[in-house]
Image (tube, grey):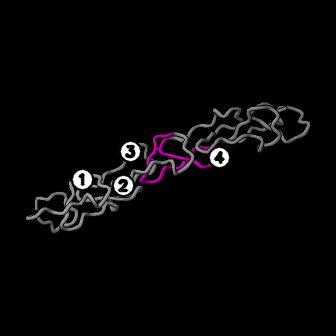
Amino acid sequence: SCPEGKYSEMEGAPSLASCLNCDSGKYAVSEGASSNADCALCKAGKFSNSSGASSPQTCIDCPMGTFSTTEGAGNSSLCVFCPRGTWSTTQGINAQSKCVSCGPGTYSNLPGAVSQATCVACVAGKYSTGEIEVSEDACQECEEGKFSFVVGAASPDTCRMCPAGKFSNTSAAATNLT
């Protein structure tokens, strides 16, 4: 019979030369596999570019900032970037939903981010309520007559009325000194 990592669809195969390697992205831990379908698949979030593998240890985690939903991935190109507005420090994630959102008050236009530090805070005088925002355009301005000192504000509630005797005839005011 064929050794681990190989299979043969031929009955009564005359030699090891008739044994074929399991495809990349697959492995066979026991001998005697009779088809490529008998080779086990690397789990989603992992890939292997090794053919003829005999162990799940040949399946490598997708790198940080990426994920893969594909079982039996035969190369790292099936590990796709977490989308803009998200990030991940975890290797081997198997769903886009496991990419962490930057959160309200921030945005990021960088796909495949590996740190929350790539999330940029809305400037004082602006706010953002969305979980996953991809540009500064998501930061909305406090309306005229209001101001906000808060950087990374996640709600319009951070916009305060100008005190008596003060006014603001501009939107996105970051001070109440007018």
Q: Give the range drawn in magenta.
A: 64-90
Distance from Cα at disc 4 to Cα at disc 1 = 45 Å
- Answer few, some or many: residues within 10 Å of disc 1's Cα (few below 14, many 20 plus, some between 14 and 19): some
Labels 2 and 4: the sequence-earlier one? 4
Q: What residue type is labelled 2?
A: Pro
Distance from Cα at disc 1 to Cα at disc 2 = 13 Å
Q: Which amino acid does label 1 sit on?
A: Val
- For disc 2, the marked residue is 104
Labels 3 and 1: the sequence-earlier one? 3
Nearer to us: label 4 or label 1: 1
Instruction: Determine the residue positioned at 18% across, 67% down.
Output: 145
- For disc 1, the marked residue is 150
156 or 40, which lies in front? 156
Assess whether mark 1 and mark 3 are in contact (beta carbons under 8 angstroms): no
Assess whether mark 4 and mark 3 are in contact (beta carbons under 8 angstroms): no
Instruction: Determine the residue positioned at 90% across, 39% down.
Output: 11
Left or right, 94 with respect to 40, comes to left
Left or right, 162 with respect to 81, comes to left
Q: Position of residue 53 (x, y in %)?
A: 69, 34
Checking the image for residue 71, the label placed there is 4
Q: Does the magenta stretch include residue 27?
A: no
Secondary element at image label 2: loop
Q: Does the magenta stretch include residue 74?
A: yes
Q: Position of residue 123 (x, y in %)?
A: 26, 55
Distance from Cα at disc 3 to Cα at disc 1 = 19 Å
Q: Position of residue 107 (x, y in %)?
A: 36, 54
Distance from Cα at disc 3 to Cα at disc 4 = 28 Å
Q: Which amino acid does label 3 sit on?
A: Gln
